[in-house]
Each structure stands twice: as C-alpha cells, then as structure tokens.
Image (cartoon, helix red, strand yellow):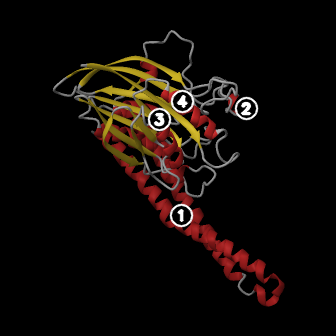
Amino acid sequence: MSFHLRVITLNCWALPQPWPVGSRDRQYRLSKLCEALLSTNYDIISLQEIWSVRDFDRINSAIKDVYPYSYYFHSGFTGSGVCIFSRHAIVSTLMHRYSLNGFAHHIHRGDWFGGKVVGMVQLEIGTYRINFYATHLHAEYDRENDLYLPHRLSQAFELSQFVKHTSHAADLTILTGDFNLEPDDLGYRLIVDNANLIDAWLARPNKSGCETGMTCDRPDNCYTARNLKQPNPAGKRLDYIMYKCGKSDVDLVMCENRLGRIPGDKQINYSDHLGVYADFVVSKQHEKEKQEHWITSASLLKESIRITGEGETRALWDRRLFLGVSFVLTAIVISTLNVEIYYPAWTAVATLFRFLLTLVIGFSLWHGFIGLTMELKALKAAKAAMAMLLND
C-alpha cells in the first residue's frame, strides 16, 4: 500500500482584539481561508496564531465535513494558538509547553501569555502510524539586540528533544510551524541536527521555479510594514515543514509556498505569513525502524551552551535589579505615609501613588524571587541537557 500525504502549515495572524491591537481583516481572512482549505485536497493542516478558541470553533464548523478530526492545544492565558485539522483519524495527542516563554512584564509582546508549545497528534492511516507535530516558537523582534535569544534557543532544543524521543515508533515524522528562525540561525541548525530532520523546502525536487521560499516580511504581502522591507528585501523564511522516515519509505514529491494573495477584488493576503505545502508519498513498511545516528555537532552544542550561559548571567543581573527596585520603592512608600498630615489636600493623590507603587513592588518581588528563579532553573536545565549530549 502506498499513498499521498499532503500537508500545509500557515501562521494565520489572528489576534482577536480590534485593530490596531488585533489583526486586520481577521474574520474576512479566516472565512476565505476556510474556503481555500475546502477547495484543496489536503490531508493535514497545521495552523498557528489562532489565538481565540471561538475562531478555532468557527474554522472547525466550516471545514469539518472534509476535515472531521481536529485538535487545539490549550496552553497559557490566551491559548497557544496552535491547532491541527485532519482527514484521517487522530488516535493520540501529546503536548509540551516550553520551559521558557519570554517575560511576564513584556505585555506588549504577549509571548509569555500565550504559553508557546509543541503539540503532537498521532494519525492512523491504514496500518501506518504518522507522528505529526505543530509548533510556534518565540518571536525575534530585534535581531541586533535579541533579548529573547536564550529563550528561543532553549525552545529549539526542547523541540528537537521532544521530536527525537517521541518519534521512534512512527512510520513517518512530520514537524510543521512558525519557528521564528531563519535557516542560518543556530536554533534552526539545532532542530535539524539534533532531531535528525530534513527541511522539505531544501529537499524539494521542484526547484525549477523562481520562488524564494520566504514566508514572512515579503515585499508582495500587503501586511508587511514598510520599515521591514529595507533590512530584508526578499523577506524571511520562518515557516517550515520538516520530516524524517521511520519504518516506511517516504518520497517528497513537491514543496512550495501557498496561501498568498486571496483571490478577488480586495487584493489582500490570507495572513502576514505565507503557507508552506508539501506532498509526500508513503510506501513499503518495514518491520524494524531504520537505524538513526544521534550525533549532534559539538560546535553547535558548545555555541548553544555559551548563549544559554549568557542568558543565566542576564537573569542574575535582572534579579538584582528587580529586588533593588522593590526595596527603593518600599522606602519611598514608607517615607510618604505622613504626607496627608501636613498636606490634607493631597490625600487622594498620595493614596493612589502609594497604591500604584505597591503594585510595582509586588510584581518586582514576585519576578525577582519567583519568575527569575524559574527562568534560571530552566536555563540551567537546558544547558545541562546540552552538556550531556556533548559528553556522550
């Protein structure tokens, strides 16, 4: 028995809040996305940034006649945004929430509230078992001053370990999603190397076209901000489909970008990202899994350990900063306790001022004693696991 397995992944950019906080044209774009999914013969669909469970339910209701199996990976405060739709039966699921997800006080970023994850669904297609993974890693924001690099690197390592240790019994392993990593980045190389994966875009046989493979910040995307076009004239390749064979023979037929411009008069895109599509042919099961060689590059691990160590140093300094701020603000609150006696007209202002300072003190103490301690331990754990592979 052999069969085609057609897979697509898309970061949908579907923040449910009104513009400018939320995503522009969200409901229209999602409705058109449903139409596109129904009109094309996909087997498995991986979506990211479906932050609202209501949006997930709407998509599910619209396409369930063709894709009757679905799963949303619930995590964090807002939800992970990661979900999967399938023509084939989902028999098992597993989710891992990354140990590091940014910072709670970076409200303008929002990654911490989403609780980034890697989710896995196991599919049964006849006698074949497919492990299908979807993920969304922490965004970069500022490449020149990348405060979140140790977090993204830790996430990339955890992702590679998760895939590596859960894919042994599968006939085919497929990893999809928005990695927020470019092909030259350390995190990308760590995922490919440590999990022994193949990048479908690089391995595609259909290389005759002029498509660059860029999926984000493209100049031909109507949602790309003008200031993002100058540093990356062609855009960035952040979205991936990766795979490896298990107990079956797998051939990649094609890989290409899809879900760009919505057909019609509005001339807008499905998202600020492009989708990635891959078509596989799965055939010939073997009794035993093909032997894999788990040798991760020593230089790759050493560089990852170094960057993770820099994250530890920054976290220690942050702890001193936040605890110092809390002590200084506590002294200010105490020094203003008798202001109302000498200036009765300022009672309301002084009370409000002390209340706001108390909130800042409370958060600074929590972040200094608890939040940063948790971050330090997560960084230590990642560094220790990398060192274990290095010494193996």
Helix, strand or loop at mark 3: helix
**Residue 15 position in % (x across, y down):** 60, 45
Q: Which mark is residue 63?
A: 3
- Quadrant of the rendering where the N terminus is positioned: top left
Q: Amino acid at mark 4?
A: Glu
Residue 20's label in the rendered image is none
Q: CA distance from mark 3 to mark 1?
A: 43 Å
Instruction: Find the distance from the CA under tag 4 to the CA under tag 2.
Output: 30 Å
Count all numbered tags in the image, as a single digit.
4
Please give the residue where the numbered disc 1 appears in the rendered image: 367
- Identify which amino acid the numbered label 2 is placed on: Arg
Looking at the rendered image, the disc whose residue lies closer to the viewer, 1 or 4, is: 4
* Tags 3 and 1 touching, CB below 8 Å: no
Closer to us: mark 3 or mark 2? 3
In this figure, which residue is indicated by the disc labeled 4? 35
- Which residue is identified by label 2? 226
First in residue order: circle 4 vs circle 2: 4
- The local crowd at label 4, few if under 14, some if 14 to 19, many if 20 or more residues have their Cα within 10 Å, is some
